[in-house]
Image (cartoon, rainbow, N blue to C red):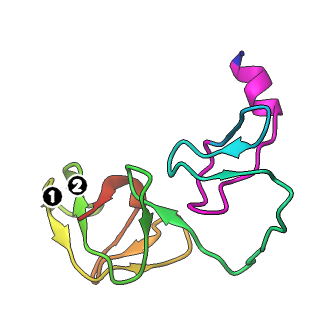
Amino acid sequence: MTLKTRKSMEYPICPSCKGENTYHDSIQFVCPDCGHEWTGDEVEEHDDDAFIVKDSNGNLLADGDDVLLIKDLKLKGSSEVLKKGTKFKGIRLARGDHNVDCGKIMLKSEFLKKA
């Protein structure tokens, strides 16, 4: 299967973990991330206010979680560098490009992993 045909197929997101890597095995849909299987005939519940933020490994983040920095980051407009492995406790999720509020600094979730 080519990348072009894969993009044209629309598979539903997993109702259990909200993962996007689902596939159809000719009988039902399967999520390889959490192992959930469903037929697709179930009624989907849509929460328009749902806000999903995932870390660099694809784990869901929530308010109050502790996270670790996965690489050194130079702070823009400063000579300061945040070192890999720095732990941020009690994060809050925010809408926007920098979607994790770590207190005095806002970071992108792609540079964090759940502790």
Q: Residue at x 79, y 32 (%)?
A: 26
Instruction: Say whether disc 1 or disc 2 marks the residue closer to the N-terminus.
Output: 2
Q: Quadrant of the C terminus?
A: bottom left
Rendering coords of residue 24 (x, y %): 74, 36
Q: Main secondary structure of the magenta part?
A: loop
Q: Nearer the viewer, residue 27 or 24?
A: 27
Label 2 crowding class (10 Å Cα cut-off): few <14, some 14-19, many 20+?
few
Q: Is residue 55 left or right of residue 66?
A: right
Question: On the image, numbered disc 2 is attached to which residue?
Answer: 74
In the image, the segment drawn in magenta is: 3-21
Name the residue type under label 1: Val
Name the residue type under label 2: Lys
Q: Is residue 34 left or right of residue 38?
A: left
Q: Is residue 5 magenta?
A: yes
Instruction: Report if the CB atoms under discs 1 and 2 are less than 8 Å apart.
Output: yes
Q: Is residue 114 magenta?
A: no
Height in image: 79 above or below 29?
A: below
Rendering coords of residue 69 (x, y %): 23, 58
Q: Nearer the viewer, residue 81 or 10?
A: 10
Q: Quadrant of the N terminus?
A: top right
- Element type at mark 1: strand
Question: On the image, numbered disc 1 is attached to which residue?
Answer: 81
